[in-house]
Amino acid sequence: VNQCAAILSGDVAQRWTLSALAARLNVSVRTLQRRLSEVPVKFNEIVRAVQLREAARLLLDTGHELTEIGFCCGFADYPHFSREFKKHTNLSPSEFRHKFAVT
């Protein structure tokens, strides 16, 4: 899982597929599926965690617009980004930035 997350973090805006990740790991899709089934984490959950971790970093470390951050982290639009971010952090992106950003 850590190796998968590291690769995904290298291009968080990319629309990752299981086959693209398997190719980067030089394993078959089936091998990757088997390895992921050994841990209680789904591929989409890993992708989402990487996207949200990068979004949180950008919210705190940059002054980029919220829409731009969402797009850079692989979300199609701001409402989708905001909904997913709030679902996982219980804060909207703007609330998160306001609460935790060092000024």
Image: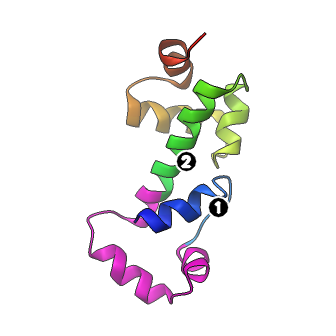
In front of the other: 26 or 76 = 26
Residue drawn at x 35%, y 79% is 35
Residue drawn at x 49%, y 85% is 29
Q: Is 71 in the magenta? A: no
Please tell me which of labels 2 and 1 falls first in the chain.
1
Which numbered dot is residue 81?
none
User: Gap between marks 2 and 1, in whole Å?
Assistant: 11 Å
Q: For the residue carrying disc 1, how many other residues have a C-alpha within 10 Å: few (<14), some (14-19), or many (20+)?
A: few
Q: Secondary structure at mark 1?
A: loop
Residue drawn at x 56%, y 14% is 102
Looking at the picture, does residue 2 appear above or below residue 36?
above
Residue 63, position as x, y percentages in the image:
71, 22
Q: Which residues are magenta?
A: 18-46
Q: Please give the residue where the numbered disc 2 appears in the rendered image.
A: 51
Amino acid type, label 1: Arg
Q: In the rendered view of the protein, which quadrant contains the N terminus?
A: bottom left
Q: Please give the residue where the numbered disc 1 appears in the rendered image.
A: 15
Looking at the picture, does residue 70 appear above or below residue 11?
above
Q: Quadrant of residue 101?
A: top right
Residue 66, position as x, y percentages in the image:
67, 27
Cβ–Cβ below 8 Å for labels 2 and 1?
no
Q: Is 25 in the magenta? A: yes
Q: For the residue carrying disc 2, how many other residues have a C-alpha within 10 Å: few (<14), some (14-19), or many (20+)?
A: many
Residue drawn at x 49%, y 21% is 96
Q: Secondary structure at mark 2?
A: helix
Mark 2 or 1, closer to the camera: 2
Looking at the picture, does residue 60 appear above or below residue 17?
above
